[in-house]
Amino acid sequence: MRIRSMIGLWLGRATKFALKISGRSGTSLPGLVAGKVAPHLLQDLMAQLTEGVIVTGTNGKTTTTALLYAFLSEEESWLTNRGGANLHQGLLATMMSTSTLSGKLRIRKAVLEVDEATLPKITAFYHPSVILVTNVLRDQLDRYGEVDETLHLLKEGTEYPGTSLITNGDDPLAMSLGISRSELTYYYGFTQVPEVTSARADVRDGAFCLLCGEELIYDYFIYGQVGAYHCPNGHFQRPVPDFGGKYDGATKQLLVEESVSKDNQVYAIASPVKGIFNQYNLLAAISAARILGKSPATIRKGIVNYEAPTGRFQVFVGTPLRTLALVKNPTGANSVLRAMEEDAGEKVLCFAINDDDADGRDVSWLWDINIEEFLPRSFCETWICTGTRGLDMALRLAYAGVDRSKINVLDKLSQLVEETSGYVLPVYILSTYTALHPLSELLRKGVTNG
């Protein structure tokens, strides 16, 4: 290892120790400090990996990574960025956490969540065994630009030799990453879904052929532009999935059909996640685990160890029962609302909307959340809005037709926790990034104290 990298490693570890003794946690700061001193440290550490998986895409990265980590670590030691710190400094902090003072990795297999914009910077010097892409959706316009820029970043980051690509065949944008790709590509997708949403007015940014520009013809939509599609000019169509999924809501099991295996295996996996978008995440993780040689039996054992990451339908048991879910773009928010529709009873719905850099300064996406179609499908007794853009969210609700007397705007996140502690009805909290961890800590303390 380079001398400068060694110095960066020691400074990063010293920063982590200082955070620990001060009672603070930091998933990225040690990596930020180390990276400033040693720009090649991450490259030097990742070069020691004997096997690596990168999970990327717009939505579902953290949940998919956590699921895949549970499967892979059942039989052997794997490293992961559990907190979802997926930029350069977060990846570096993760790698340093398993290195010795001399820079040797104790664990040499890693499954890492990587931000879409960071992906090509990482794969420029490290080629993983597998890259898994969840979907390609419009997200944070002030950071990524339009969806074609996100697609460009993903294409640049997935075209290196020696890497297998696993991607969502039901998403035409994610599927397009495999077109004309020389390396091995696998597709996953649903062969049967509990509900099709052709009538819903979801945002469908990728519903056009990338080769001729014609509007794609859909047999049905599942969410966003995800569904069964084909180009009217025959340029491409939804592929037959190598890993097909059928979700049984009654038994809460995901039935997987493998057309890629010689014996066309079919097996059921108990699903620990909620919502059709999360069933996609589960199917993606199963697909990657199978490509890496894990058996269905190992996957079943590993799924018991799965823990929902912070804010990914994270449930805080108590009175009331409170569920925290990350939202960051319209398709993700609509998917969370659809999952909430499974709860037929009365509920309290809260939005914590910030506009810091990590959230995206542009909050115009709030107007693409399909509140209008959610209203008649799920009864909400009270609506609470908070965060730096809480008033914007309250205005959006009012325009959707929510009774203004039921909308309560709060100044502080702590007030949301205090306000909802008095309810008997289940409480759902939809939060952007920078409000997510503070809310999780406040809710955890409330449950502990209660």
Image (spheres, grey):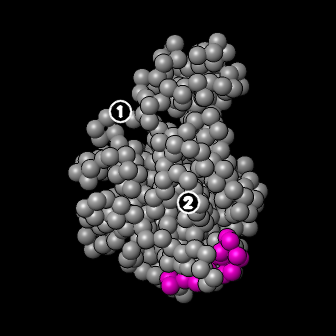
Question: How far from the left and from the top, in percent, is residue 124?
Answer: 65, 38
Can the viewer see residue 356?
yes
Asked whether the viewer can see residue 351, the reply is no
Which residue type does callout 2 highlight?
A: Gly
Bounds of the magenta segment: 207-221
Q: For the residue marked with disc 1, what is the amino acid? A: Ser
Q: Which residue is mark 1?
A: 77
**Residue that protrudes farthest toward the left in the picture:** 297
Could you classify mark 2 by the number of other residues whose Cα lies within 10 Å: few (under 14), some (14-19), or many (20 or more)?
Answer: many
Above or below for 132 versus 193 = above
Q: Residue at x 56, y 79 (%)?
A: 230
Image position of 275 (left or right of 39) = left
For the point 56% across and 53% down, which residue is it? 182
Is residue 319 in the magenta section?
A: no
Residue that numbered label 2 is attached to: 178
Residue closest to the eye, 414 or 236 = 236
Residue 231 in percent (x, y) is at: 60, 79
Q: Position of residue 1 (x, y in %)?
A: 58, 16
Q: Nearer the viewer, residue 428 or 103?
A: 103
